Structure formats: C-alpha cells, structure tokens
Image: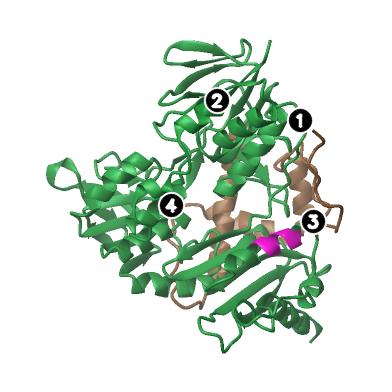
Chain colours: A green, B brown
Amino acid sequence: MSERLIVIGGGGAGTAAATIAKRLNPDLKVTLFTEFPDIAYSPCGIPFVHGREIEKFENLFLSTVERYVEDGLDMRMETTVTDLDLDRGTVTAKNTHEGFDRLVIGTGFTWEKPDVPGANLEGLHYVKDIRAAMLFDEQLDGMKRVTVIGATPLGVEMAGNLGHRGLQVDFVDEGPWVLSEVLDPDVAEPVHESLEKRGVTLRLGTRIEGFTEGSGGKVGAVATSAGELECDAVIVCLHKLPNSALAEAAGIKTGTTGGIMVDERMHTSADRVWAAGDVVEVPHGLSMLPIRGLTGSHAYAQGRTAAFNAAGQDLVYDPVWIPWGMVAGDYTIGGFSIGETLAQAMGVPYVVAKGVGVSRARYYPGATRTHVKLLADPESHKLIGGQIHGGEGVKERADFLAFAAKRGATLEDVAWMENIYSPPIGALFEPMAIAAQNGLAALRS
Amino acid sequence: MSAYKRALRERSEHYLMQAAMKEVGTGAPSTVAPYKKRGGLLWRLVFVPLYRRVPWTVKRRAMATLRMTSTGWTPPAREPSEPWHPPPR
C-alpha cells in the first residue's frame, strides 16, 4: 500500500514540496491543504500591480489548481488545518481527521500587527492574499493619501509603487533610514532620493502611536510621535512572523526566532515531519545563527529539500549567504550576507572595500554607475558581506558574491577575477574587481 | 528556556542594532536619529559596551555553547570544493 504525504501550506515551500515529492515518488499519495482559494501565484508581484507596473493581477498566476490535480495531487483548497496529532499521525481540517505517513509543514508567515490603539480598525491593509489585494486595488482608485508603515522591503516596494500610481504617500518607520535592519546609510541615500521623487514623504525616526477612526468606521488618521497624519488607508508592512503555532502546539521545537527548528534535511524535531519556507529558521553561513523570513527562492529551495527527503531520497540544504536585491523607487539595490551596520552590531571584525564602475561600456547608451561595497575578514580577506547599488546588474553581482563568499573567496580572488567586456553588456573594468582592488590598496597603505 | 532565549536574542539584537545605526549613520546624509524607546538603560549602558569588548571568536563560541546557533547543520567549509551533485536516482 502506498504511503501518504500531507503538505500544509500552499505557498512557495508547500507547492514545491508537494509537486516535487510526487514527481520523485509517483506512488506517494500527496495531499496539499491551503486556507486560501488560490495557489501558484506570485504575491511578490502585488506591489507592482498596485503601482501599475504590471497590468493586472491575473498575470501573477503561474499555474492552476486543475493543473496540480492533473499531476496527481489531492488539493484541499480553502481548508485550514486546525490541529496536528503527531502520535496518531493525523491532521484535523473541517472537523475531519486525516492520517499521514509523512508530513511537510509550510505554513509560512503572518504580518506583525502594530501594538497600538485602533489597530483593529477597518482600512488597515496587509499585503498577502491576492484576492484581498484585488479588492484593495479597486478601493485605491478612490483614495488620495495613504500611509505605509514599516520601511521593510515590502514597505519600500509599496511606498514606491503607490507613489508611482500618483497617490500621496506618508512612509513611517522608527529607523534612521529605510531598510535600516539590512541596508547601510550610504546605500539608503539614493533610495530616499528616488522615493521622494515618486512623491513619497519619508517620516523616519517616527513611532506609530495609534489609529484614529474616520468616516464610516474606517481608519482616518495615524497618530505618530511626530504628529497626526490623515489618510484614506494604512498599509502595514512590519516584520514577518513565523506561522508556527500549529507546529508548536503539536510539540515540534521552535528556536530563538520563533521559527520551526530544522536540520539540513529540513527535518523537524518530530519523526517523519519536515518543514520549509517562512515558518522555519535556517543558519546564516557566516555566524551559524538561525535566521528566518528570507526570499521566495529560499522557500522554494527549502521545499525542494523537504520533498526529496520526504520522498525517500537524500538532499541537504546549505547554510544561507542570502543574496538579495530589489527595486526601491527607480533605483536598484542589493547585497549578500551582512552590511556594515549589521557587522558592527554583531561585533564581527571587518574591512571595507568600496568601488564604483559602470554597467556597460561608458560610451554605450544606457550605462549606469554601479557602486560596490565589500566587507571582508581583516585576517584572511575572505568575503563576509556586501552591498551593491545602481542600475542594471545588481542582482547578478549579488548572486555571484553570495556564491563566492560561500566558497571562501577572498578580496584577492575578486580583485583579479576575469570579467566580460562587451560594450552593450559589460565594461572593461568590473565594478566588484575595482572595489576589491581599492580595498587591498587601502590595506597595504 | 526557549522563550527566554528568544527574548534574550530579541532584546540584545535590538540594542546592538540601535547602537550600530547611531555610529554608522552619524553624519550620513538624509538619515535621522532612530526613534528611542524609553527604558533599556541596562542594555544600552552595560550590555552593549560589554558585548563589544568580547572578541568575535569568543562570542561565537559562547553562542554555540548556549545553543543559540543552529544544530544539525554542517558548518560551511568556505573552501573551493567539488560541486554539488544530484543524488542518485
């Protein structure tokens, strides 16, 4: 008799786990539970539809429920798993117990809610579910002024896109610059300029103190430490919190971030149970400290690892070096591992290597300046982090540097790396190499 | 214990980041002072300076001893090595 794998969660990790496990082991009966009516869409694209960069929400869908059913998956849409019994090997959904032989938990995250009066008022919007986003988008047509709370990556994308749509945007955060938990201030400066050009008013170093009711019982203003801001809606973009309550109640161990603890095979503390995505914590390659709330590509890769192991094969996931990148306003920023601010906070010894180059041959139309800042260990010169900003090529450099750091590359390796010179796509001098050479020169002097 | 460790990490990270932001951000154009919550004197005046006096290698060892680091994972070799191969089917 074939075994049954149950996957809880229909996000990147859950869908990867279910589809890949079924592909690897066609005899496995795979059932996927999701509380939402839709699956296989990109929630990361939602801010860009609001900003009219993407024409319609339908473009964000990558597949259909029917397609998964055709592939042999048992899809339980709009079905919330309310209980997990590890001793009996059952999950409970809609008051029905369903048995499993193996389980993958991919329950994702919930958004942190502001802990201030009025936080339950109507008009506070959280970006997650595409149907809620579609409704909100229609409401946005009748709005003039919105407040975005939290200068997180999502907050920056929402503020920039709503500014692009022509709305008056107040962008509020307690930090001294946007993305202050990951970004360094020198990289934040052009981001601020770009957001302001889009009509975003930055209100940094500012705390939210409450929400005031306006007309029709909806939020009408935000009380802050710097005064009151009138608004038609509030978009809350605070931290991602792991949706680990179900697992924790079942006795599965969670760690110092609140995420489910997993080993390198994405196996949890419970027998035959794996977990992946925003609900788990994984180690940072530099410090081995557990972290969570990474990107969609991390969720997918973790789901794939869980799938291999749940399907009876063997696959290991590495500690992460977190290449990241995004468009902030009209400006592209990115990096890997840690920046200078985080290195300073952690107490990691580092030297900085900075350089500026161009993305194409200087004379070729469309060339943009690319700024690179590398952090390296003062003794070994091994890369430990970095940030990049400019126009094109930020993503590729962040990916490359994360991989190079993982393999122990040094400033010397990067300084004398080979690079492509082709006027439309690459300049003679690679900006990363310029930064590394500058850093080595500074160390010698 | 898990809740204690979680709270310890959350608090320590908050105050270490606040101190780092102040130092790295001082003089940087277009930045402001971070919002400072009331309280936390002990963290700001005792914990942060003490933490900074301890070398990173000692801190790493202490974090591992306190089981603040991930377990069940192979620490990266950080040396050039054989590329990853898919598992045999």
Q: Earlier in the sequence, mark 2 or mark 1?
A: 2
Assign the N terminus of chain A to one quadrant of the image.
Answer: top right
Q: Mark 4 points at which residue?
A: A45
B8 left or right of A137?
Answer: right
Q: Which of A182 and A369 is in front in this view?
A: A369
Instruction: Specify few, some or many for label 3: CA neighbours under 10 Å numbering under 14, 14-19, or 20 or more.
Output: few
Residue at numbered disc 1: A313
Q: Mark 2 points at which residue?
A: A73
Give SS at disc 1: loop
What is the chief secondary structure element of the magenta stretch? helix
Position of the C terminus of chain A, as image quadrant, is bottom right
**A313, B6: nearer the viewer:** A313
- From the viewer's perspective, is the residue at label 3 or at label 1 nearer? 1
Instruction: Place residue A200 in its image quadrant.
Output: bottom left
User: Magenta includes A401?
Assistant: yes
Find the distance from the CA under tag 2 to the CA under tag 3: 49 Å
Tag 1 subunit? A
Give the CA separation, mark 4 to mark 1: 33 Å
* Residue that lies at the very extreme toward the left in this rendered image: A215
Task: Give amino acid for label 1.
Answer: Gln
Compared across the picture, whether A152 is left or right of A294 comes to: left
Q: What element carries label 3?
A: helix
Residue B57 is marked as 3
